[in-house]
Amino acid sequence: QVQVVESGGGLVQAGGSLRLSCAASGRTFSTYTMGWFRQAPGKEREFVAAINWSGGGTYFSDSVKGRFTISRDNAKNTVYLQMNSLKPEDTAIYYCAAITSRPLFTTMSYYRLPDNYDYWGQGTQVTVSS
């Protein structure tokens, strides 16, 4: 069983920045693919970003590309989502998720599907005021 715990959410004004952290348990964290998703009220959960096991491959949705970055520190079993130039439409609960087995594919189309992730955190609220 892998535990995933997000932190760092909060209230920020439009144009501001936040950094989310996600800590995952397990001695093989360095082999996990990690992803961030978000869900706004009344909307489906949507893909935000993903990072492969080494950090050498990163993937972003079009809505956050150029504003968000994703990184990981395998020594700390932690992945980060740096969110800059935040907009009110970024308001959502942000979830971190892990693919703990070897991915069948290493493509955006694979990483953007929630069903491909094995473990999820409880989420952290991000609210961007206008």
Image (spheres, helix red, strand yellow):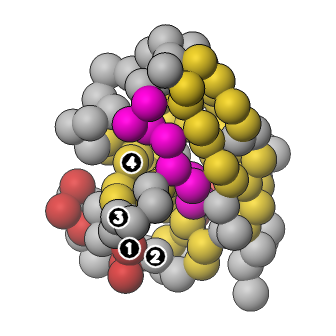
How far is the residue under mark 3 from the one under mark 4? 14 Å
| Closest to the observer, 57 or 96 | 96
User: What residue would you read off at disc 4?
Assistant: 48
Range shown magenta: 88-96
Q: Amino acid at mark 2?
A: Tyr
How far is the residue under mark 2 from the one under mark 3? 19 Å
Q: Amino acid at mark 4?
A: Val
Instruction: Measuring from the top left, give residue 33's x and y in whole percent.
Output: 49, 61
How far is the residue under mark 2 from the one under mark 4? 14 Å
Residue 100: name its quadrant.
bottom right
How far is the residue under mark 1 from the one under mark 4? 11 Å
Disc ID at residue 43 = 3
Give above or below for 47 relative to 99. Answer: above
- Inspect this view and state whether residue 43 appears: yes
| Closest to the observer, 99 or 97 | 97
User: What residue would you read off at disc 2?
Assistant: 117
Q: Secondary structure at mark 2?
A: loop
Q: Nearer the viewer, mark 3 or mark 4?
A: 3
Instruction: Measuring from the top left, give residue 86's x and y in whole percent.
Output: 47, 23
How far is the residue under mark 1 from the one under mark 2? 6 Å
| Closest to the observer, 48 or 86 | 86
Instruction: Measuring from the top left, give residue 106's x and y in whole percent.
Output: 27, 61
Q: Secondary structure at mark 1?
A: helix
Contact (CB < 8 A) between labels 1 and 2? yes
The residue sitting at the front extreme is 130
User: What residue would you read off at disc 1?
Assistant: 114
